[in-house]
Image (cartoon, coloured by chain):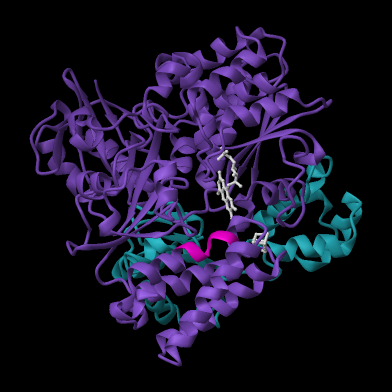
Chain colours: A purple, B cyan
Amino acid sequence: MTRIYVPRDSAALSVGADEVAAAIVAEAARLGVTIELVRNGSRGLLWLEPLVEVATPQGRVAYGPVAVEDVPGLFAAGFLNGGAHALAHGLTEQIPYLARQERLTFARVGITDPLSLDDYLAHDGFRGLRAALALAPAAVVQQVTDSGLRGRGGAAFPTGIKWKTVLGAQAAQKYVVCNADEGDSGTFSDRMIMEDDPFVLIEGMTIAGIATGATRGYIYVRSEYPHAFEVLGQAIAMATQAGYLGDDVLGSGRAFRLDVRLGAGAYICGEETALLESLEGKRGIVRYKPPIPALKGLFGQPTVVNNVISFASVPIILDRGAEFYKNYGMGRSRGTLPFQLAGNIRHGGLVEKAFGLTLRDLVEGFGGGTASGRPVRAVQVGGPLGAYVPASQFDTPLDYEAYVGISAMIGHGGLVVFDDTVDMAEMARYAMEFCAIESCGKCTPCRIGSTRGVEVIDRIIANQDRAANIELLRSLCDTMLGGSLCALGGMAPYPVLSALKHFPQDFGIETSQLAA
Amino acid sequence: MSYRDIYADLVDEPGALLPIFHRIQDRLGHVPQDALPEIAQALNLSRAEVHGVMSFYHDFRAEPAGRCVVKVCRAEACQAMGANALVRHAEQRIGTPLGSTCADGSVTLEATYCLGNCALSPAVMVNGALKGRVTPERFDALLAAAQHKEQAA
Ligand SMILES: Cc1cc2nc3c(=O)[nH]c(=O)nc-3n(C[C@H](O)[C@H](O)[C@H](O)COP(=O)(O)O)c2cc1C
Ligand code: SF4
């Protein structure tokens, strides 16, 4: 009996994976051959989705992108034995896009059935938790600190230091909150972890609970991710049933209970204090800091808030040791980051690599240039608050500090590629518009400034008093940069100013006029 | 009428307001405004607070939506692959601007800002189902299929 894999990741479903799976089952029945169909996660080679894999004695052979119409032909070509076909890509593991990656956090993603505990255990699952339970809480925190792991949600704050603060705080109830609001365009790594390897997130959060003395956890998932929400609910029920969650985690006498909550369509709820407000049932309005959430977080209690990828990176650190993880990366950017190649790119998908590679490696090497076949003009790195990076900066190493050095940020690792048909003045306008739509309204520079920003850019585009309006735009950006409470208003100027700096001609400015 | 049966089991959850709104909207398709006073009472909150929360979040509707809800992603990754043209196409095809329901109540067309399908842009969501690589032709086919399904139901 041959085992066939058809992903259940929502990216694969969005291009027909369910229909393909049904067609495979029907064709096998028609031919009278028995198959075992596994709904795995996605390998992250998203341009090949739906990517169907067939288990052979040599390993899994990949076919993609498979449409329903291709299915009879695949059977006819003997794909059950890994037969040759126009859609065949050989052994999945040897596809260069995958073979060149360093998959630590995503080690299991695409390989296993996301909702099989047996699969999870067979692929090193819960080894990190077992290791953590054998250590004193402070020793667990020390491992995380020593690994050099920094928050993957955007701000890159050292995870171990945050945990240490929560461990040291005295309170009857502490919380662990997972930020799964993933609002940045061009990012989907959180979604993939939740849908394709949910137990690793559960394991990471449980370790955080054990390490800091928190007994309750919440995962706050954006409502745009209904599939992730559902998978997490099922995974939590299974993990609880099997004793990995609950009042007595693996017989340790330690309790950790986990719930999933749904957001409601507000980008600002990705900001950690707005998220906490939202979890408390309030409007998602940013809080003043201090107090920091580690001391006064959810319901006023000490709270660990981390991104999905931060938590999901912890199990392997506890399992393999801080040193192992730390040996990847460069400078103060240790370990790996799952980069997400998105937008106008030929080979879009997920690439987990150690810090230190370049945008050129990712966009040209892995990505194969644009989907349109035209030249790459700009890449927005780090979401809607991230800078537009021009080709002249493609060789800067992807390292948190190096990116700050070019007035950019890595953020959550999303790369949105644009070809040479993009109008950067329009993109700058959109950055301001987005800020206006999503502002929580607490501070004036963000709330009013962003609306003014749209108007000013409109005047620049319409060539009304252009020089004066460009000056006005700069000063408006200055006000937002300096006078905003959080990074929505405080960083929305980055895409605007980078567009203006690197692509002045799109704003109707001759390069020679720009000396100032 | 009382809506209490819909959400009674959630009232004791800490921070229950969003889960309650989601539950009601799941069941009824929107959150009727006459439900707010009783929710306020059940959670011991002021009406103003409950109303404020409801209106803060883009997801919650005070009025029923069209029979088919189509969300088109307007964020950067989709823009890089022609989302603006897709929005114009959708508006024309459905005959209603983004953020509205067409006159016969058949379709609500909305903007969304990232569906997490950014490598398969442009992306849309049709009645909660994510779709990728959506060309104008594919958009028409997806809409027709959703309307067909809705008529059959
Ligand atoms: C406007 C705004 C949106 C944010 N959105 C997210 C998000 O969607 N996911 C996330 O993990 N962090 C987001 N953050 C960062 C969080 O505030 C916070 O730094 C993070 O959750 C901490 O976790 P980490 O240290 O593991 O990254 C956002 C910040 C701001 C200012
Ligand atoms: S910068 Fe904007 S989003 Fe952030 S607190 Fe101020 S008003 Fe709210």
The image position of residue B17, as x and y in percent, is 77, 51
Q: How many marks?
A: 0
Q: Give me the residue at 83% from left, 52% from top.
A: B4
The image position of residue B122, as x and y in percent, is 36, 62
The image position of residue A81, as x and y in percent, is 13, 26
The image position of residue A473, as x and y in percent, is 51, 77
Q: Is residue A499 visible?
A: yes
What are the residue bounds of the magenta stretch? Answer: A489-494
Tell which of A410 and A472 is nearer to you: A472
| Above or below: residue A42 compared with residue A504 | above
The majority secondary structure of the magenta stretch comes to: helix
Q: Give me the residue at 63% from left, 22% from top.
A: A240
- The quarter of the displayed image where residue A296 is located: top right
Quadrant location of the N terminus of chain A?
top left
Q: Is residue B103 left or right of residue B117?
A: right
Tell which of A466 and A226 is nearer to you: A466
Quadrant location of the C terminus of chain A?
bottom left
- The quarter of the displayed image where residue A331 is located: top left
Q: Is residue A96 left or right of residue B77?
A: left
Q: Is B52 included in the stretch rendered in magenta?
A: no
| Above or below: residue B63 compared with residue A61 | below
Q: Name the quarter showing ligand 2.
A: bottom right
Q: Give me the residue at 76% from left, 40% from top.
A: A298
| Above or below: residue A311 compared with residue A367 | above
Tell which of B33 and A23 is nearer to you: B33
